[in-house]
Structure formats: structure tokens, C-alpha cells
Amino acid sequence: MSSSNKVETKLIHAGELRPRVAGAVNLPIFQSATYEYGGEDDYHDIRYIRLNNTPNHTVLGAKLAAIEGAQAAMVAASGMAAISTTFLSILSKGDHILLQDCLYGGTHDFVTKDLPGLGIEYDFINASDPASWEKKIRKETKIIYVETIANPLMDVPELPAVVEFARTHKLVSIVDNTFASPINFRPAEMGFDLSVHSCTKYLNGHSDIVGGACIGKAELVKSVTRKLNHLGGTMDPHAAFLLHRGMKTLALRVRHQNESALKIAQYLEKHSAIGKVNYPGLESHPAHARAKEWFDGFGGMLSFELKEEDAGITDQFLKTLQLPICAPSLGGVESLITRPATTSHLGLSKADRKKIGITDSLVRFSTGIEATEDLIEDFEQALKKVSTTVSR
């Protein structure tokens, strides 16, 4: 297929095996741990499920690279397998990493609790203030790492500045592109060396697998793949099949979620019971201009706080909702809602959460593909009940 094809076409056709296996329209699940020896002279080329080179793995890699406009890609058993293995393929004892100060809790925990034991040091940066980064860099610094849309406060870093800073200081630039997805932002087009994803979220979109991906420059992806081969965080064939199937509707899902989340954010921002809404699609958001310039859509994720900043009242509100499911994770066809202090960022101390602006009453909402009007109606009835209770 042509590299000029649109992303919708690439999601269906990029990377697919030709000729098709026994004429099958859908790629089969290759439920085989081992394959016939074909004369390979490199360990990592031997056909074996742990070495990420079954047909299920290679088709996914080619498709992921195509939709982000990158040279190569690989999949892993989870988003954290992809992130941790990427870090460990670049960093070694004595090295240093710069990271955005507001991150997914699992990434924050890995960096602060595991990397120091390996002799790797870190510093957090304000990703919206490039002038402050020079103070944190060292001669041992190897990576600068940010999230396209930060979890859970929805900030948008100075992404071109991250790329330029990395080039100037010969660092590897890495971005977690989970929240934006390749439909809204393609890091390789801006010059990022690598992007990582939790495929559990938007890429799969159906809340039925965990998976991860690393996408970007071929030599770096090869290095990450070889590290993963040794650590063993390989995606199993059935999960690969489900991810492959889920990705085909990515553009349809995400574009609906973009539109729906914006309408819900606008509704919440005007509601008298809401104190604050974090969504880069709102003109009031401090990073709105950046998001509008760089993204094709503002994403399906938003967070907010009730005017009554009380965790108990917030929990009552969550229980009153009928459509969104109160559960961790995000990016599925069903709307999910949670308090990050009790799920995604529970591993951070309360002091660390407070430092980066995550209160105990902050609510994170992942917009599904339900009718927007139904979701807004549900928010309305829940907010009305909570407001009535508070007024008593």
C-alpha cells in the first residue's frame, strides 16, 4: 500500500500479510510458541514467541509504525513493560533522566522507586517551561520524557521544545502518546525519537487486554526489542489478535470521543456545581493554544473537581452516575470515571500528589462512545442530587 494513504486506510491495510494466510480476511491467531528453524544466524531472529517475531507481532509492529509515520514499532505485554524496557534499553548505572513532573502513577513509581536501585538518577521538570530545563541537565543525562497530554491534569508540554532540547543536548526524546493516540498526534512527525503507548487504552479500545508499544527510530526500537526479548515482557498471540482487531476502528472511536469530550467539558465548565475542568479543548485551558496548533483533536480524557472539594461528596457523585463505570483505566468504548488518588496515582504519597496538583477530590473521566446527550443528562441528574444533598 502507499505511504501516502490516510490513517483510516493504514489502520485496515498497513502491515497485513500478503498473500493472505489461506485466504483468510482476518489474520489468524498464531498460537505456536516455536517455529521451524530457517537458517537464522542471530539469536534475536530465531522464530520464537518470546522474541516478538511471530506473524501476530510483526503485523502489529508494521501497522503501528505506519499510523505514526515512524520507521519501526514493537509491542509488549503491557504499557509499563514498554515504558520500563524502553528506559532500561537506554539507561544504565550512573545515567540520569529528565521527566515531566506530572506523570502516570505507574511511570512515576518505576522512576522513583526502581531506577535509583539500579544506580540511575532522575529529575522532574516543568514541561511547560523550557527555560528551566537547563538547570536540571547533567553530562550523564540520556533521556527527556514527557506525556503528550499529562495524566490526569491534561496539561500539554512544550512538545517542539522537548525535541529541540533533546537534539541540542544529544538526548533521546520520548513521549507517552497514550492519551492523544496516533489519530490526534503522531510524535515522529514532530521529530520525537520514540513514543510509547499503553495499548490497553485507545489503541485496543475495548477494555479486554493489556498491552504496550514502542514506536520510533528503527535502531532504537531494535534495541528496545532486544532488551524486551531478554526480560520476557512479550505480548501473547491472543492479546495481539484482539489489539489488531481493535485498532481497525481507532479513527472512528477517537474522533467521536474527541467531539463528545469537548461537549461534556463545555457543559461541566458552565455548571454551577463544578469548580474546575481540565481539558485542552477548552479555551480556558492554559495549554489550549498549544493543543490547537499541534493536535488533530483534543482527546477523550478530561478531569474536573466539584466546587465542594470533599472526597466523600465526590464519591457520592460517582455512585450516583448511571452510565460511566467507576473503574481504573481509560480509552474504551464505555465511559469510565475514577478518582486518581484511589487508582492511577494511589502509589504516590499524598504529599507528592499535592505537589503536582492532584487533589483527593479530583475526578478523571474517560469518554466512551455512548451518545453524548445521554452522558450529559446523566451528569446533570448526578450533580443535581449531590447539590441537593450539600444544600441541606
Image (cartoon, rainbow, N blue to C red):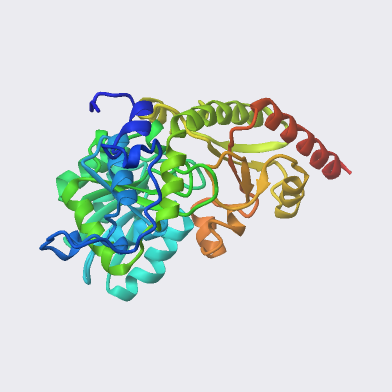
Q: Quadrant of residue 193?
A: top left
- 209 vs 296, left or right, is right
Image spot of residue 331 (x, y percent): 52, 42
Residue 60 or 91: which is nearer the viewer?
A: 60
**Does residue 70 sit above or below 213 in this rendering?**
above
Q: Residue furthest front?
A: 22
Q: Which residue is drawn at the image coordinates 63% and 50% (left, top)?
A: 338
> Could you tell me how many numbered marks the image carries?
0
Residue under the image location 18 percent in, 59 percent down: 45
The x, y position of residue 42, in whole percent, is: 13, 63
Q: Is residue 349 above or below residue 267?
A: below
Work out whether residue 74 can be spotted: no
Residue 186 in the image: state x and y as whole percent. 32, 35
Q: Can you tell which quarter of the image residue 351 is in?
A: bottom right
Where on the picture, by quarter, is residue 48? bottom left
Q: Nearer the viewer, residue 230 or 323?
A: 230
Q: Quadrant of the C terminus?
A: top right
Q: Is residue 141 above or below residue 272?
A: below
Furthest-bottom residue in view? 117
Please indicate, yes or no, whether residue 159 appears anywhere in the rendered image. yes
Q: Residue at x 66, y 38 (%)?
A: 275
Q: Position of residue 298 (x, y in %)?
A: 47, 31
Q: Quadrant of the N terminus?
A: top left
Q: Is residue 205 left or right of residue 67?
A: right
